[in-house]
Amino acid sequence: MEETRVVTQGARTLVIGLGAMGSAAVYHLAKRGHPVLGMDRFRPPHPHGSTHGETRITRRAIGEGEHYSPFAIRSHELWREIEREAGRELLTPTGLLVISSPGGSATMHVAGFLETTVAAARRYGIPHELLSAAEIRGRFPAFDVDPEDVGYFEPGAGYLRPEACVAAQLELAKRLGAELHYGETVLQVEQEGARVAVRTDRATYGAEQVILSAGPWLPELLGGPDLSGGSRAWPFSVTRQVLYWFAPQESIAPFLPERFPVFIWEPRHAAEAFYGFPAIDGPAGGVKVASGTYGETTTPDTVERAVDERSVERMYETLVAHCLPGLSSRCLKAVTCLYTVTPDAGFVIDRHPEHDRVVIVSPCSGHGFKHSTAIGEAVAELVTEGRSRLDLSPFRLGRFTTR
Ligand SMILES: Cc1cc2nc3c(=O)[nH]c(=O)nc-3n(C[C@H](O)[C@H](O)[C@H](O)COP(=O)(O)OP(=O)(O)OC[C@H]3O[C@@H](n4cnc5c(N)ncnc54)[C@H](O)[C@@H]3O)c2cc1C
């Protein structure tokens, strides 16, 4: 029997979804002493949404747009603070190598990725080096670059452990007084005047504000009768992504972090860009690589989670064999994950156009993790102070024609 609870004296803000964005939001709200209730249909970290697969690239000069850099810069400060508070390593700086080729057609998320990365590094004083193909070969021999390729190296970049970041922020949030409910699914969100009613499979809650950080389930929640905005066409679509871990041909040595930084590569010969990580778990773990796939849309409940042999072969033949010939075709592991993308590959962090007490925090088009703790902080400022120190205006929903 459903119980009805009105959380007037308790939580003032309710956070729906405790993955990358929601765990950061509850942590930063709790850190401000703000009464917050967070809930998730699973128990994060978990492998059903967008925040699993062991590693995420983090970099501060952002090729998707210079306006993202303040979030990445702030996140790097915050990850270090969270590491100290939680007593575990979250960010490992291996350096980042971006490789691109003038005239090539592969792009990472947006056109002009390398040029924007360099511009952002100059604008924000982020230490970096520009490398020729010969210099890339000399320093990082596993990358079989073309003579025309050029490189950008950011020594302070590296990778984050997404599952540990989520777990750490949830633990700290709890320690700071946040109420967290796991295994509870939100079914309906409805703003009634100055309050928002949230109906779950267990109870109905009331809160002053709601943060909607449901990751790839966001389109489903926004499609419900109370949030849909009538005929509004929301700019989110969910796409299936696959992560692959390939074994080395012979020695793992060229793929260890000292010789092999995290990388983003727009190869001259290929139609698509790809990215990857050093062999952080030695030969048994292999080298993780992935490219972005944007064809068919899906949902988290219907997506095919199994990865077939054909996809593995395609990844090896089109990208790995050409670019990283020291890797073999032996795939040690492959995992499915979900991007929720917008038409311009940008973020949406904004109040709902019809329900001003509902803040939408999108899953960020496949490049949001590195920014997530600063996004959580900015959203906490938005709901507690009415505005954030970092500029959220580039992420307004109004930039899309939604009707
Ligand atoms: C393959 C892949 C590689 C990526 N690589 C990078 C990278 O290298 N660098 C980078 O910066 N970013 C990267 N990203 C992007 C980044 O991981 C995402 O931006 C981020 O993880 C999205 O987090 P989220 O909180 O929006 O979603 P999630 O972490 O999926 O969280 C959503 C949560 O909401 C919960 N939920 C959903 N519906 C309900 C409901 N009705 N009731 C209660 N709870 C609900 C879910 O259980 C889930 O826990 C990558 C993403 C993928 C998929």
Image (cartoon, rainbow, N blue to C red):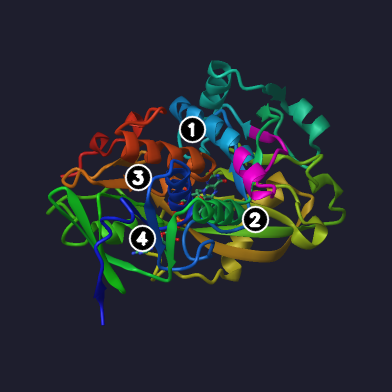
Q: Quadrant of the C terminus?
A: top left
Q: Quadrant of the N terminus?
A: bottom left
Q: CA distance from mark 1 to mark 3?
A: 19 Å
Residue for badge 3: 342
Height in image: 248 above or below 130? below
Using residue 169 as the reference point, say whether residue 187 is left or right of it: left
Q: Amino acid type of disc 1? A: Phe
Q: Secondary structure at mark 3?
A: loop
Q: Secondary structure at mark 1?
A: helix
Q: Secondary structure at mark 2?
A: helix
| Front: mark 4 or 2 | 4
Residue for badge 2: 317
User: Quick one: label 1 or label 4, which is nearer the N terminus?
Assistant: 1
Magenta range is: 81-98
- Name the one closer to the observer, 92 or 82: 82
Q: Is mark 4 within 8 Å of ligand 1?
A: yes
- Name the one closer to the observer, 162 or 324: 162
Residue for badge 1: 71
> Can I make out residue 293 in this image?
no
Q: CA distance from mark 2 to mark 1?
A: 36 Å
- Name the one closer to the observer, 65 or 19: 19
Q: Residue 121 in the image: state x and y as whole percent.
A: 58, 22
Task: Please report contact status of discs 4 and 3: CB closer than 8 Å, yes or no.
Answer: no
Q: Amino acid type of disc 2? A: Glu
| Front: mark 3 or 2 | 3
